[in-house]
Each structure stands twice: as structure tokens, then as C-alpha cells.
Image: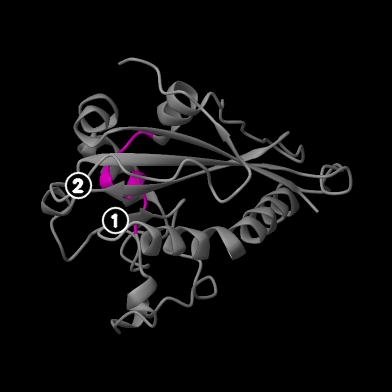
């Protein structure tokens, strides 16, 4: 089984927006993704992200590092196998991570959690958006930092002290990184996530 660690950082949302948001650039990346207009968690949205973000003043960023065990790190026979193995490792982490994020909302009333990537509630290619139907789980539907135009790569290196790792051909990366968050209306938020997070001091910007 993979080893999963969480690292936590926080900062005023206005500071994060000023330093780490480039909406047009990252929306352009979203348009190139196969999930664009195909998953309810992904752009384009039926709401105004600017008005949503304006409700909050603080952001708690959760970095989740997934380290494959020796068996999972073994060489792959093809690039397709490597992609599928990475997907399975992410799915393992998301089994508990997504519900833990919703639990944080219960602990901090008025907060809103942000997913690490697209929604995993339904099987791949199973989102009802493809058929023009409403979301099956609207009460659990959340969105990601990147879907709002934030630079997750710089976020991990600058604020969490984690450098993103990329894999090529049949070689597995040493670890995978997920980035999620919690928007709050004041500076009250979690000091750990869920109970194994490594505190990470936020640098002065």
C-alpha cells in the first residue's frame, strides 16, 4: 500500500489570489483537458467563480503526498500501464480524502472544501454532464483550485515545500502530489489534516 502524508499551509485568500492566480492561462489548460464540459466539477461553470471566492477571506491548502511501495514502484511494461498505476494510487488516496474534506466543512461552518482535481464520485466517463443530466451527488459536488485559475505547481513548491514529480515512459515517479483546500470566512481553520499532517509554515509573500 502507498504511504500517504499530508502537509498544511494557510494564508489570506486575497494574498493567494494576487500571487498565484492566472485565470485565463489555467482556463486555457482546462479547455485542453478531456474533462472540460464533461464533468460537473470542471469548467465551464454555471456560477461566477469571482462571486464565490468573494465570500471567503482565508485559504487552507492541503498537500497530499502519495509514495508508492516497492511493488507499486516496479517498472511498467508500457506508458499506458504507468498511467493506470498512477490513477489507481490517486484513487486509493481519494477514497478517504474527499470525505475528509467534507468533514472539515462540518467542523468549520460556512467553509467550502476544494477538491484535488476532478470529481471521483462517479466512475470515469460516468458523469451525468455528458448526457446533459443533473449531478447525481450535488451535495458532494466541489471544485478544484486549478479550475478557479490557481497555479497548483507554484503552490506546492512555494507554500508546501513539495516539488511536483513527473513520470515519463514506463518509469514510475517517486511520489504523486494532490492539492486540495478549505476556504473559510475568517482565519479559523484546521491545524492538521486529518491527523497526520506535517505542519508547514507559510513564507512571507
The answer to whether residue 145 is magenta is yes
Q: Residue at 22% x, 39% y: name it.
A: 23
Label 1 sits on residue: 111
Q: Which mark is residue 56?
A: 2
| Residue interval drawn in magenta | 143-151
The answer to whether residue 192 is magenta is no
**Left or right relative to 166: residue 190:** left
Label 1 sits on a secondary structure element that is loop
**Left or right relative to 95: residue 10:** left
**Vertical order, 193 against 136 (above or below):** above
Q: Residue at 49% x, 28% y: name it.
A: 160
* Quadrant housing the N terminus: bottom right
Chief secondary structure of the magenta portion: loop
Q: Which mark is residue 24?
A: none
Residue 130 picture location, percent across and down: 36, 76
**Left or right relative to 136: residue 96:** right
**Left or right relative to 70: residue 112:** left
Mark 2 crowd level (few <14, some 14–19, many ≥20, 10 Å Cα): many
Residue 161 picture location, percent across and down: 53, 23
Between 60 and 139, the one nearer to me in the picture: 60
Q: Quadrant of residue 135?
A: bottom left
Q: Residue at 34% x, 83% y: name it.
A: 131
Between 170 and 11, the one nearer to me in the picture: 11
Between 129 and 151, the one nearer to me in the picture: 151
* Quadrant housing the C terminus: top left
Label 2 sits on a secondary structure element that is loop
Residue 198 picture location, percent across and down: 59, 34
Residue 96 picture location, percent across and down: 59, 62
Q: Are marks 1 and 2 in contact (CB under 8 Å)?
A: yes
Disc count in the image? 2
Amino acid at each position: 500500500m502507498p504511504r500517504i502524508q499530508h502537509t498544511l499551509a494557510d494564508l489570506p485568500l486575497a494574498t493567494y489570489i494576487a500571487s498565484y492566480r492566472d485565470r485565463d492561462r489555467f482556463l486555457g489548460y482546462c479547455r485542453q483537458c478531456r474533462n472540460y464540459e464533461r464533468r460537473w466539477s470542471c469548467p465551464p461553470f454555471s456560477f461566477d467563480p469571482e462571486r464565490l471566492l468573494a465570500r471567503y477571506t482565508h485559504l487552507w491548502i492541503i498537500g497530499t503526498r502519495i509514495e508508492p511501495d516497492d511493488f507499486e514502484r516496479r517498472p511498467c511494461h508500457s506508458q499506458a500501464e504507468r498511467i493506470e498505476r498512477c490513477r489507481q494510487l490517486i484513487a486509493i488516496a481519494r477514497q478517504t480524502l474527499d470525505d475528509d474534506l467534507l468533514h472539515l466543512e462540518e467542523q468549520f461552518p460556512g467553509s467550502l472544501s476544494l477538491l484535488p482535481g476532478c470529481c471521483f464520485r462517479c466512475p470515469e466517463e460516468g458523469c451525468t454532464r455528458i448526457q446533459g443530466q443533473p449531478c447525481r451527488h450535488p451535495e458532494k459536488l466541489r471544485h478544484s483550485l486549478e479550475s478557479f485559475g490557481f497555479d497548483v505547481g507554484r503552490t506546492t513548491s512555494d507554500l508546501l515545500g513539495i516539488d511536483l514529480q513527473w513520470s515519463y515512459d514506463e518509469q514510475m515517479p517517486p511520489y504523486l502530489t494532490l492539492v486540495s483546500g478549505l476556504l473559510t470566512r475568517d482565519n479559523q481553520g484546521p491545524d492538521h489534516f486529518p491527523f497526520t499532517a506535517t505542519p508547514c509554515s507559510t513564507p512571507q509573500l
